Structure formats: C-alpha cells, structure tokens
Amino acid sequence: MLRRVSELDLSGECQRLGVDLPKVLSVYNFHFWFNGSSAKIVLSLEPPAVASVGIDGLARVYAGEGLDRAELEERLVSVLGLREDPAEFYRLARSDPLLAPFASEWAGWRLRGTGLWWALVTAVCQQNASFRQGWRMLAKLVNRYGRGVELEGEGWVPLPPSPHDVLSDPGKLREAGLGYRADTVVRIAERFVRGEVPDEGELARMEAGEAERSLKTVRGVGSYTARLALALSARRYELPPIDRWVRALASRAYGVSGGEVESAWVNRWGRWSALAVVALTVALDAAPLREALARLEAGRLLPEPGKLSPSTLWSFALC
DNA sequence: TGCCAGGCGGGGT
DNA sequence: ACCCCGCATGGC
C-alpha cells in the first residue's frame, strides 16, 4: 500500500501554458490507467511511486518510504510536458502539409513521457507490427505479469513488469504475443539489471547521436526503437523515428523520394523532429498505411472518433 | 490461405 | 553504401 505523500493543483499552470490536460492524459493511454476523468501515472517502478491526475488538474502523488516528495512532484510535472515549451513546434506545424490542422485544433496536446525501460519495451512492441498489435502486446504484458500497487484510498493500480520480473519469467513475453521481439526485451532487461543503461537524466545531457548509439548496442534495438524511446523517455526529439509509415506519408506530402525523407524531415522540424512523428500518428489515428494515405489525399488530418486509435485507445479493453 | 504490419540484423552485392 | 531475406504473431 502506497501512502499519499503530496497533493497539488496543476490547473493554473495548465491554463497559463495552454495545456489541454484531457488530451495529455488520454492520448496513447490504456483503460487501466485512464478512465475518462483521471489518469494513473507511474513515476517510479522500483520502488513504486504513482501519481493520480484528474482532467481538472488535481493531482496526488503516492509513494513508499525513501522516495523524495519534491523529486516525484518534479517528475510528474516534467512527464506531463509542463517543463517543455513547444511553441516553435506548433508554429512550424501551422504551415505544414501534414500537421497544419493538428496545430490549430490540438495545440494543447503534450507528449506524456515514461521511464526509459518502459519506453524501450513500448518501442520494441511496435517493430514490424500494426499499431493495434503493438498496443495489444503492451496491454497483455501488464496483464500477464500482474504487477501492481494499492494506493491509499484509490484502489489497485496495475504496473508494468520490471526488468527483474521479465528475467524471472521471460516466458510471459511470448504469452503476451511478442514473438521474436521477446529476446530483445530480455536483452534490454539484462542491461537494466546490470546497471549498464544510462538513466533519463544522462540521456537528456548526451548528444543525440551518442544517446542513440548507446541504445543501439542492444541487439534488436535499431534506429527506430532507440529514437522513439529517446523521445518518450527523455523528450529528445532531434532524431526522428522514421518507419515505413512515416516514410510513405512524408514522401507523398513533401514531394521527396523515400530515401530523402529523413533529411527533409529534419530540415523542416529541427529539434522537434520526433515529436512531429508522434503527433502525425495521433493526427492520422495511426491508421494502416493505405488508409492514412487516403486520408492525406482527402485532407482528413485530424483524429476521428470511433475506431481504435492513439486518442481512443484508453476506451477499449485490449485483453 | 496467404500476406502484411509504425524493424532488425546478417549476408549478399 | 546499398539490397534482400527471414524472423513470431495476429488480423483480415
């Protein structure tokens, strides 16, 4: 049981910064962490600490002994994107053929961050799989390993498996449908247990290419995975995770060949490159490529309610 | 049934 | 520096 260690009101700060908290909390979230009115945000896995944040901005932090309250509060604020000023990103987006509508309708969205371990697992689960398949793997992982904590007065909250959990029962990775990706997750877990992985703070200080190279030393972690994990965990956006989906859409929208997409993307988005990739998946509902290309042609560049997508994921039970 | 999906590494040229 | 293939799994 985790006790409540602090309570804070983020509504004023969100309003001042133009942050749309419902979007921040709902996008790319699961039903077991967001119910439409409040979200559970994992601030630390070992030992566990969790924040409960309402769409009204009221937040409570829960932790055991030994974790610093001020540090957890700062982590929460940073994970919600409140320490980041994306004004330049949205300014660039306003005149972009892919993200212009998103910039006018979704400027209050901020990327919700996560720890490096879970960011890497998340990115590995997107490899060579559909959006739907990747997120089903993650939901099953949380479900199969069955970790969680009780919050004082708020009930049970599931937690992702820790690296130790994965190493003590790696078979559950395949039960969760990871297939050959399971070996990569095991190798990542080994690095964490041996303390061979830089923490988010170190990653934030490293030069981007160096940070990418250090993650790529794990077999099974390539550019896409390393870059997506850097964006999700350290808010480092200089290097875009270009997959075949983004490559095809950008090639069409920017009028360049597939091989030229990365340099065109970085020229356009600069230090916001990876954020633009994630935003594009939200704008186009991570639709399968054929459908996403059709939406680009039709100018349907805003999230559409209904089907399973980054913005509606939280309202579906995937397992 | 067969093919593809938000990659990757290894082995070819 | 490229090109090409197989890789587990699930969805259609």
Image (spheres, coloured by chain):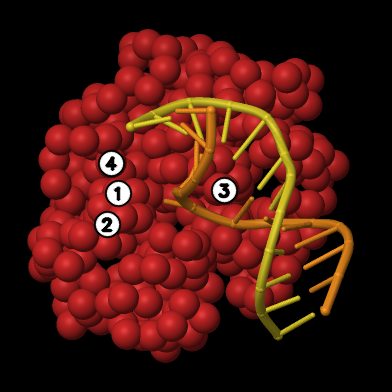
Chain colours: A red, B orange, C yellow
- In the picture, measured across the screen, residue A134 lies left or right of residue A6, that is right
**Kind of residue at disc 1:** Ala
For residue A35, which quarter of the picture?
top left
* Mark positioned earlier in the residue sequence (2 or 3): 3
Give the labeled residue for mark 4.
A309
**Kind of residue at disc 4:** Ser
Structural crowding at the residue carrying mark 4, measured as other residues with C-alpha within 10 Å and reported as few (<14), some (14–19) or many (≥20): many
**Kind of residue at disc 3:** Gln
Q: Nearer the viewer, mark 2 or mark 3?
A: 2
Give the labeled residue for mark 3.
A127
- Determine whether label 3 and label 4 are within 8 Å by CB: no
Q: Nearer the viewer, mark 1 or mark 4?
A: 1
- Residue shown at the point (67%, 60%) measured from the top left: A222
Give the labeled residue for mark 1.
A287
Kindly indicate whether the residues beneath marks 2 and 3 are on one polypeptide chain: yes
Give the labeled residue for mark 2.
A292
Q: Is A305 above or below relative to A13?
A: above
